[in-house]
Image (spheres, rainbow, N blue to C red):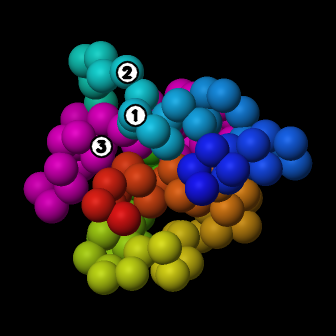
């Protein structure tokens, strides 16, 4: 099913290889010079937001938005069904469904 999803997404232009690798791995962990803004946010999640922000232009400003909009991101983090939640502000409409899964993966790798 995962391979089918990847093939379908790539054929429809909804994902690229870098996005696929990020969804699977969370990106390559390097030192993050940006301090985690919240005590409730795991360092691993913050590091992944930082890497995702730098992945491509679709995610430009994501890290800064997370840091400046605690309530919306905390609601998503606390949700029992984060995939059913609306992403805060512009992120709900500016990313594809696949990219939304990437964002959720940063906050909730268990989902």
Specify whether residue 95 is in view: no
Whole-percent x and y of residue 66?
41, 54
- Report, in whole angstroms, how far the alpha carbon at label 2 lies from the one at label 3: 13 Å
Q: For the C terminus, which image quadrant?
A: bottom left
Residue bounds of the magenta highlight: 35-62
Residue 71 appears in which quarter of the rendering?
bottom left
Question: Few, some or many C-alpha atoms within 10 Å of disc 3 (few <14, some 14-19, many ≥20)?
Answer: many
Residue drawn at x 30%, y 17% is 30
Residue closer to the observer: 40 or 34: 40
Q: Is residue 72 magenta?
A: no
Residue closer to the observer: 34 or 20: 20
Contact, CB < 8 Å: mark 2 with mark 3?
A: no
Q: Looking at the rendered structure, which numbered label has been put on residue 28?
A: 2
Q: Secondary structure at mark 3?
A: helix
- Report, in whole angstroms, how far the alpha carbon at label 2 lies from the one at label 1: 8 Å
Q: Nearer the N terminus, badge 2 or badge 3?
A: 2
Contact, CB < 8 Å: mark 2 with mark 1?
A: yes
Q: Nearer the N terminus, badge 1 or badge 3?
A: 1
Left or right: residue 70 compared with residue 103: left
Q: Secondary structure at mark 2?
A: loop
Residue 82 appears in which quarter of the rendering?
bottom left
Most common secondary structure along the magenta stretch: helix
Left or right: residue 12 compared with residue 70: right
What residue did someone put label 1 on?
A: 25
Left or right: residue 24 compared with residue 47: right
Residue drawn at x 75%, y 43% is 7
């Amino acid at each position: 099913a995962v391979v089918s999803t990847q093939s379908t997404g790539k054929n429809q232009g909804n994902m690229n290889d870098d996005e696929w690798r990020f969804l699977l791995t969370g990106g390559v962990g390097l030192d993050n010079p940006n301090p985690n803004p919240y005590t409730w946010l795991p360092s691993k999640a913050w590091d992944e937001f930082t890497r995702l922000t730098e992945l491509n232009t679709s995610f430009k400003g994501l890290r800064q938005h997370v840091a400046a909009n605690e309530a919306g991101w905390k609601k998503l983090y606390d949700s029992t069904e984060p995939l059913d939640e609306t992403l805060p502000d512009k992120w709900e409409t500016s990313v594809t469904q696949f990219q939304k899964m990437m964002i959720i993966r940063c906050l909730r790798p268990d989902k």
